[in-house]
Every structure is written in C-alpha cells, then in structure tokens.
Image: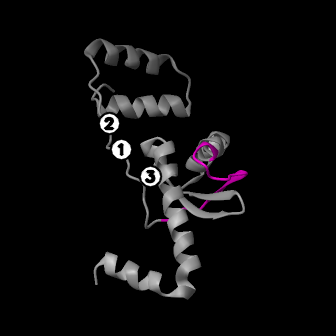
Amino acid sequence: MRLQKLGRVLSAEGDLQPVLAKARDLRALAGLVQVFFPADLARQVRVANYREGDVVLIAANAAAGAKLRLLAPTLSQFLSERRWQVNSVSIRVQPNSARQAVVAPQKTATLSTPTLDSLRALHDRMAASPARDALGRLLRRRGRV
C-alpha cells in the first residue's frame, strides 16, 4: 500500500485524528530542529515530544546533550519566531546503538623530517607521563624511536 493511500485511510478514521495531528506537529518541529542545528549535531538529536510549550529533545550521547543544553535558549527563540509556542526546551540523553552517528574517517597527517626530529627531542626532554607515552607511540608508528 502506498503512503498516500495509507494517509487517506488513517485520516478517514476519526479516532486517529489527534494522533495524526500530533505526528504532523512533531514532524514539522523535527524539520525546524534539523535546520537550526549544524549538520553534525543535527544527526545526534531527535524530537521526542512537544507538549504545553515544552519541547523534549533526545541526545545521542552526553557530549551532544551538553551542546544542546547550551543552544536550548537560542532554539527556543528560533522556534518562537516561527510561531511555535515554546516555553522551554528539555534535553534527555539516551544513547541508542541502533542510531549511531556518522563518524568522521580517521585523519592522517604527514609530518616532515624536521618536525619528527623536534618531536623526538621533545620526547627525550619530557618526564615520564601519559603525554610522553602518547608521543612515544606516535614516534614509534612513524619509525622514529
């Protein structure tokens, strides 16, 4: 059954009208939220609910949740300017393994010989620490230890 036909069948059922209206509202609100946030952050957020002026967003992880909390007042203003009656924006963190964010590919860098020599000298001067260990691993991967 095509979606258009399914939509007509569902809209003909009177008892489903409130559910369909809520679904339309959430879809429209989700579209505005996706437009508001940068693409990387937008992939990590979804609209969970909108009730009595409160927009509830679900963040994919704690880092995304922290960013959303910082941007919540601006989002509220953005939605109000688009005629949504928004009093508050609530953020909930709910990691979901089925909806993984797209991860940027591993970046590679080519280090020049003088740069590698400088890093080797820095490594030799450093006291034992996790930073020295990390620098040592980098130099070993580059064949400089």
Q: Is residue 92 visible?
A: no
Residues under labels 3 and 2: Cα distance? 21 Å
Dot 3: what SS? loop
The residue that disc 1 covers is: 104
Q: The N terminus is located in which quarter?
A: bottom left
The residue that disc 3 covers is: 43
Q: Nearer the viewer, residue 138 or 96?
A: 96
Identify the amino acid type marked 1.
Ala
Q: Is residue 89 visible?
A: yes
The residue that disc 2 covers is: 107
Question: Picture quarter containing residue 98?
Answer: bottom left
Question: Picture quarter containing residue 22?
Answer: bottom right
Left or right of 11 on screen, residue 56: right
* Residue drawn where x is 72% and y is 62% of the image: 52
* Residue drawn where x is 46% and y is 45% of the image: 35
Q: Nearer the viewer, residue 128 or 26?
A: 26
C-beta proximity under 8 Å, tags 2 and 1: yes
* Residue drawn where x is 29% and y is 33% of the image: 108
Dot 2: what SS? loop
Identify the amino acid type marked 3.
Arg
Magenta segment includes 84: yes
Residues under labels 2 and 1: Cα distance? 8 Å
Magenta segment includes 94: yes
Identify the amino acid type marked 2.
Lys
Residue 8 place in picture, x, y as percent? 39, 81
**Of tags 2 and 1, which is closer to the observer?**
1
Residue 31 place in picture, x, y as percent? 47, 54
Q: Which residues are magenta?
A: 80-96
> Please, is residue 135 above or below residue 38 in the view?
above
Q: The C terminus is located in which quarter?
A: top left
Residues under labels 1 and 3: Cα distance? 13 Å
**Lower sequence index among marks 3 and 2:** 3
